Image: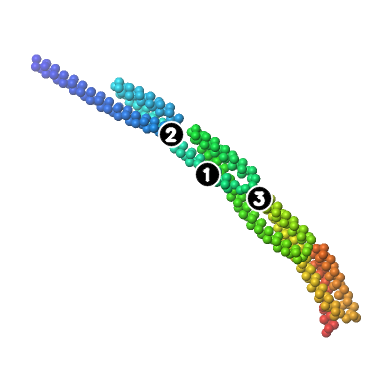
Amino acid sequence: MKTEILRYWLLVGLIALLATSGLAQTNAQRDKIRTELERTDEVIERANDAARSSNTPVAAPSLQKAIELQKQAWGYFKGNSFDLAYRYTMDARDLAKKALVRSRLTEQGETVVQRKLERAAELLERAKEAMPPGPDGRLYAIYESAKNNLNRAWEFYRIQQYRAALKLANQVINAGQDILNAANRQIRRYAEFERRSEAVAELIAKAREKIAECTSDEALRLIEQADKMYQLSRELVSEGKYAAALRSLQQARKMAIEASKICNGVGALSRRHDRIKNETDRLAEKISPNDDTAKKLINQVYEQLQLAEDFINRKQTEAAAAALKAAHLTLNQLKKRLTAHDR
């Protein structure tokens, strides 16, 4: 009898111990699942805040699904279905994390695109200010197209189509840089033109002074044409036609040089003619009336001088130079003869 009673109480104690142990395990599992559920709630809350801050439509479906799964997970938890509660809350957490990542990426993307758009606007404004005056249709067309693209880019940005906005912003930046590069090239070309223009203007001025001394009609005609070509070059460069302006400037330079050459040649020949004639006149006084050879030589000198004068008047400088050379050679022969007779 005592043995049976002892066995009974041992069995009761064992049952109580098992019950206590099972309850402890259940409470531990409950606490663990509750911790996971609360952690998922925190992730969902952060994702919800990020979605509101970035106003990201692409994150909404994942976030909404996460909220629904988390609600079911809490329901299973309250019904002591801990395994289902754990599975649902982990799925909800994964979706919430995806929504959080999408919201942050969108927010970062928004910042990047905004900065790119601001840079594009600043560069385009600089390009507008750098565009040289004059009807340069190509640069103006590039600028207008870039301005339209910038407006469209801002529209895409406002409706959160950041990829399209970024693409257009890059196009605007490239266009603005092209305009700046073209403007800088024109500035350098204009500076080069001004340098050459100043030199040609000085050349024309000096040629005018020489023409005033030699009174050559041909030189005067050339210098007037040179001045016209110079003025034309100024008009062309004001229209942005640098190549044509430089060609006109080069023609003006050639004409001024040619005019100077004419006056330089005519003037020098005239002065040489006068020197030879003066010397001939002095020698003529020394010729004896009986020296027929000397008379013949001096007559040849006078004939060649007259011929040279005619060529000079007709601006035939090469022929005039040849006549003067012949006169000089003949004059030397005359001087030698007269010197021999003096001995």
Q: Quadrant of residue 8?
A: top left
- Specify the farthest residue to the top: 1
Q: In the image, is residue 244 above or below residue 27?
A: below
Q: In the image, is residue 246 above or below residue 163?
A: below
| Label number found at residue 122 | 1
Q: Amino acid at mark 3?
A: Ser
Q: CA distance from mark 3 to mark 1?
A: 28 Å
Tell which of 69 and 131 is nearer to you: 131
- Badge 1 marks a residue whose secondary structure is helix
Mark 2 Cα shell of 10 Å, populated few (<14), some (14-19), many (≥20):
some
- Specify the farthest residue to the bottom: 343
Q: CA distance from mark 2 to mark 1?
A: 26 Å
Q: Horizontal placement of 82 versus 188: left or right?
A: left
Provide residue 48's location: percent of width, then percent of height: 39, 30
Give the residue number, with chain letter if any, for mark 2.
Answer: 54
Of the two numbered discs 3 and 2 in the rendering, the one whose residue sits closer to the viewer: 3
Quarter of the N terminus within the rendering: top left
Give the residue number, with chain letter if any, for mark 3.
Answer: 238
Provide residue 253's location: percent of width, then percent of height: 70, 58
Q: In the image, is residue 331 above or below residue 265?
A: below
Q: Quadrant of residue 25?
A: top left
Q: Amino acid at mark 1?
A: Glu
